[in-house]
Structures are given as structure tokens and as C-alpha cells.
Image: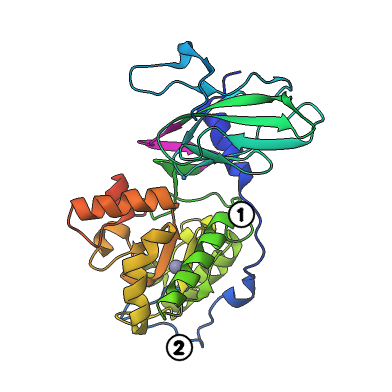
Amino acid sequence: MKVTKSKIFAAAVALLFAFSAVSCGKEVPKTNQDSTSFNISGGTVENTEPTTTSADVEEPEMTTETATAFVVGKKLSGVTLSYEEAEVYIGQTLTYPVVYDTIEEVWSSSDEKIATVDSVGNITGKAEGKCIISVVDKNDDTKGAEVKVTVKKGTGIETTNGLTYVGGILIANKSYSLPESYNPGGLTSETYSAFQELVEGAAKDGISIYLSSGFRSYELQSQIYNNYVNAYGQATADTFSARPGYSEHQTGMAIDVNIIDDSFTGTPEAIWLEAHCNEYGFILRYPYGKQDITGYKYEPWHIRYIGKDNAKAFREEADRRDDVNLTLEEYLDIDSHYN
Ligand SMILES: [Zn+2]
């Protein structure tokens, strides 16, 4: 069964987990009285803005000159899946294929460097190539089925269900908005666990990083933005606060850490974050001196999860360009401005 890209993306959209560990409690819209965390002239308001080798059987029809052939360890049968072939971008996660037979599912990947699979069958692309994702019955390991997975390095812009992916990375900036209905319910589970690793890594270096603002829903961003419009007018509000649907915080993959204002700049925590966040799958989203490109002023506290493989590739590109302040917009060759 062929799975179209749009079906894959639709499935990916359905996958985002509701992760409620990060409560919205601390993400109450800032009132006009709450001036401690912003400074319009300094442009520091961020609270507002809002990725085997057992070669018995080969399948020659999948072999191309550039791609490795799928390698299958053993023949599985007796189980039917909703799809048996899939394409996924590095860093993208596909919703599990439905298993139409009653078995105790055990999922595995023939090559976890290419794609991984979780305990329910959700498939995540890790590196360019091909591999087999298998499900077998825990009680009979000859009973099962396989999904041929091709992991691609994404290029170009893909839009499905109102979501824009570039190179498999979900984009939310001033050019590419999110639908009002898009609500992962909190930070995505991958983002949250990667952030926990980051916090632990920082602690080992004697650096304290903590979450100040994570997921913000469309509705919450509306409240925040409208408060600012009422107080300062839209033109001014647009200089520091994202319009609803345009905030990266709605993706569930953006986090503001520690102190959300200019006093965070140059602190040991900010310096550590800039040097090490890539190791944990994050990038600094609004680097210094790139306001004309990102549409936002320097925000050393705002990090975005793009997955470890993507973040590593991003860092390597920054090194190639000799630009420590490389932006996602430059990396993906997209723009960010309200139309
Ligand atoms: Zn932020």
C-alpha cells in the first residue's frame, strides 16, 4: 500500500502528544501592571511572543544506485498493517500503522541509526537511508509484519492541514502561521525530555537552567497579544509580541528559560545555552543581530527543539558559514514577515 506524503503529514499532525507536565499556570497573560519582565524600548518582551546486517533476504526492486536496499531479517506474515511503506523526513515522526490483528505488539527497527520506533509503533526518521520497521507477536515471533521506511533529508516547503514543514521541521514565524486548531496540549514529549537532558547537562557544568514559559495555546496568545494591542496599539505590539497563530510557542517545541528579559544576556547561563543547546537538539531561535531575518529581537532565552540530528546538522552549517548566529530562516532559506 502506497502512503502519500499528505497522508503521512496528516498522520504526523495527529501524533503530537498532550503533555501536561508543563502547566499553563505560569503562562498567564502578562498584564499591563506586570512591567518587570518587559521593556519596550529595549525590545525585550519575550513572554509575549508568544529526527543489520542480517542479509538473508534482499528486495532488489527497492534498490537504487544511491540508496541502500532494504534488508529483511526474516519473513513475517499473518499480520496486516494499515501501511507497509512510508517516507519520513529526518526528525519527523509518523503515527503508527494500525495493526489489524490481535497480537501482543513488539516493535523494532532494523537500523536505529536510520529510523527508530517506539513501543506503539510511532516511527521517527533519524538519518538519510532505508530500514525496516517490524512488529511481531510477543508470543510468536514469526507472526508479524514490516514497514519499509525511507528517511529523507527534507528540502522544500510542505504544507498540510495548515502546518508548514521545511526539511521536516515545523515552522512558525511571521510568514508561516499555525492553525487556530493546532494544539499539542503542552510541550511535545520529545521536547520535554530533551529539555530535561539539557537541564541535567547544564547542572553538571554548574549552570542552572529552568523553564519559564513553554507551550502557549492560540487562545492564550490571543489574550496576550490583544492586551498589548490595547495598551500600545498594533504597530508597537507587533514589534515585540507575536500575533495569535504566529508564535513558535504554539508548536509545543519552544521554551523560554530563566529570565525572560535583557538582563539574561551575557550571563553564564546564556553563554552556556548558546554553546551547548545544540547538543540536546535545540537551537537558539532569535540570535543576536538577526532581527531583520527572524522578525524578532535578540532573545537569548528562547530555544526551539528541532531534534538532535537536525540540531547537529544546523551547528555544522553554522560552522561552515562561520556564523555563530545562524538563524533557522537562513538555514532553511525561508523568510519571516507578516504579509
Ligand atoms: Zn519565547
Q: Amino acid type of disc 2?
A: Thr
The crowd level at tag 2 (other Cα within 10 Å; few <14, some 14-19, many 20+) is few
The crowd level at tag 1 (other Cα within 10 Å; few <14, some 14-19, many 20+) is many
Residue 313 lies in the magenta stretch: no
| Residue at far top of view | 61
Per the image, the residue denoted by label 2 is 36
Residue nearest the observer in this picture, 122 or 301: 122
Per the image, the residue denoted by label 1 is 184
Image quadrant, ligand 1: bottom left
71 shown above or below 113: above
Residue 81 location, x and y as percent?
69, 25
Q: Secondary structure at mark 1?
A: loop
Residue 161 lies in the magenta stretch: yes
Residue 124 location, x and y as percent?
53, 41
Tell me where the magenta segment starts and ends, as one range.
151-162
Q: Is residue 67 left or right of residue 70?
A: left
Which residue shows up at 50% across the image and 76% down it? 210
Residue nearest the observer in this picture, 5 or 203: 203
Residue nearest the observer in this picture, 192 or 24: 192
| Residue at far left of view | 322
332 shown above or below 60: below
Q: Amino acid type of disc 1?
A: Pro
Answer yes or no: is residue 334 visible.
Answer: no
Q: Are marks 1 and 2 in contact (CB under 8 Å)?
A: no
Mark sitting earlier along the chain (1/2): 2
Residue nearest the observer in this picture, 210 or 181: 210
Residue 261 location, x and y as percent?
39, 80
